[in-house]
Amino acid sequence: MDRSNPPLVAAFADALRDARVQAGLSQEELAGRADVSVRFISLLETGKRQPSLSALAAISAGLGMPMSALVMTVEARVATSSQDFR
């Protein structure tokens, strides 16, 4: 079963990048706080990778925000992008 969802991946990439910039962090700083590689952050922000739940938790903590806040932002972006196609 194919579970790819390009609009969801793109929404997460944009939400992550915006949250990182709003927090005033570079990719390197966020990677250090989340204990992941800079390359992983870059791949997430370009939509080439998707986070596991544990990575999502670490990244959210690194951003200083609850996972739910990041996920709600992604959901709102997905809803907005799906309305753009109507």
Image (spheres, rainbow, N blue to C red):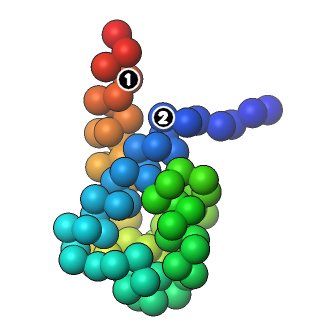
Q: Determine whether the residue tagged by mark 1 lies in a helix, strand or loop.
A: helix
Q: Which residue lies at the image location 34% right of the left edge and 78% below the top edge?
A: 26
Residue depicted at x 50% and y 70%: 41
For label 2, the SS is: helix
Q: Residue at x 45, y 89 (%)?
A: 32
- Residue 68 visible in the current orientation: no
Q: Residue at x 46, y 59 (%)?
A: 45
Q: Residue furthest right?
A: 1
Within-10-Å neighbours for mark 2: few <14, some 14–19, many 20+: some
Seen from the viewer's position, the closer of residues 50 and 52 is 50
Q: Amino acid at mark 1?
A: Ser
Instruction: Inspect the image, locate mark 2, and give the three-letter code of the amino acid beneath it.
Output: Pro
Q: Position of residue 8 (x, y in %)?
A: 48, 40
Tell me if 48 is positioned left or right of 58 in this view.
right
Q: Is residue 41 above or below residue 79?
A: below
- Check the picture and name the quadrant holding the C terminus: top left
Q: Find residue 70 and name its label.
A: none
Q: How many marks?
A: 2
Q: Are marks 1 and 2 in contact (CB under 8 Å)?
A: yes
Residue 53 x %, y %: 56, 64
Mark 1 or 2 closer to N-term?
Answer: 2
| Drawn side of residue 54 relative to residue 72, left or right | right
Say few, some or many: other residues with alpha carbon within 10 Å of mark 1 (under 14 / 14 to 19 / 20 or more).
few
On screen, 28 above or below 1?
below
Percent across and percent down for residue 83 are 31, 19
Work out how far the residue at label 1 is from the one at label 2, CA to CA, in angstroms: 8 Å
Circle number at residue 7: 2
* Res 75 seen here: yes
Q: Position of residue 76 (x, y in %)?
A: 29, 39
Which residue in the structure is indicated by mark 1? 82
Q: Is residue 63 above or below residue 14?
A: below
